[in-house]
Amino acid sequence: MSAEVERPARMEDRRVRRTRAQLRTAFTSLMAEKPINQITVRELADRADVNRGTFYTHYRDIYDMLEQVEQELLDELTAVLDRYSAQELRRGIRPVLEEVFCFVRENAALCTALLESRSEQPFFQRVSDLLWERCMGEWRGIYPRLGEGAQGSYAMQFLVAGTVGLVRSWTARGFAEDPGTMAALAERLILSGIR
């Protein structure tokens, strides 16, 4: 009997995941075409091949979907960053940078749409904030040459903005270079900024 109960739950979970993936894909393609404030629930539901009620089962409105999609992507990026300890980063930052560039390329359509979004709270700023937290916390002790106080904060802000800007530029150019090349460039720029 318990197997019967588990099976529908698993099927439902699979259907929910598939529906959310359809909505996310449709949302990504619409964001590539137009600003967020011009996307309607009706056109999103039509593009995803679901009814509007299904959309509202998962999201309150388009902006709620934007926030949830951004948060899911940030959670995935955080998981990538969490795989690297301060000790590993002391040995070199290229592996984490390469993994970040791979992550962005694997999520190319969504990252491009979000990084180019003109929403009120752009994804660009949320990614910058995530990296800022890391840099000011765990990573700051790795590079003591950055200094303390305002000078250290300015240097760290420069490095964060430059790194996110590099990712944004790479997406805008259609991922022309491979992640390893971009990681090597980012590492060189970061380390020259620290010295």
Image (cartoon, rainbow, N blue to C red):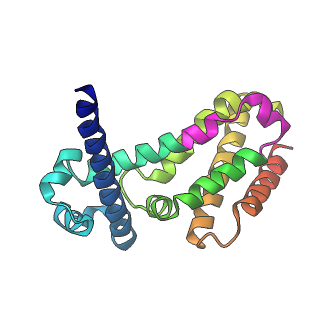
The quadrant of the image that shows the C terminus is top right
The quadrant of the image that shows the N terminus is top left
Q: Report if residue 60 lies within the magenta region.
A: no
Asked whether 151 or 51 is in front, the reply is: 51
Label the magenta part by its dominant secondary structure.
helix
Asked whether 147 or 29 is in front, the reply is: 29
Examine the rendering and report whether any part of residue 59 can be seen.
no
**In the displayed structure, would residue 81 be above or below residue 119?**
above
Q: Report if residue 83 lies within the magenta region.
A: yes
Q: In the displayed structure, does residue 5 sit left or right of residue 184? A: left
Residue under the image location 28 percent in, 54 percent down: 19
Examine the rendering and report whether any part of residue 168 can be seen.
yes
Total tally of numbered discs in the picture: 0
Asked whether 12 or 22 is in front, the reply is: 12
Where does the magenta region start and end? Answer: 77-93
* Residue 151: image location, x then y, percent: 73, 36
Q: In the displayed structure, does residue 65 sit left or right of residue 131? A: left
Query: Which residue is farthest front?
Result: 1
Q: In the displayed structure, does residue 185 sit left or right of residue 169? A: right
* Residue 139: image location, x then y, percent: 71, 33
* Residue 107: image location, x then y, percent: 51, 58
Residue under the image location 28 percent in, 44 percent down: 11
Residue under the image location 81 percent in, 43 percent down: 194
* Residue 182: image location, x then y, percent: 73, 61
Asked whether 70 or 8 is in front, the reply is: 8
Specify the quadrant of the image occupied by residue 140. top right
Specify the quadrant of the image occupied by residue 138. top right
Residue under the image location 78 percent in, 51 percent down: 187
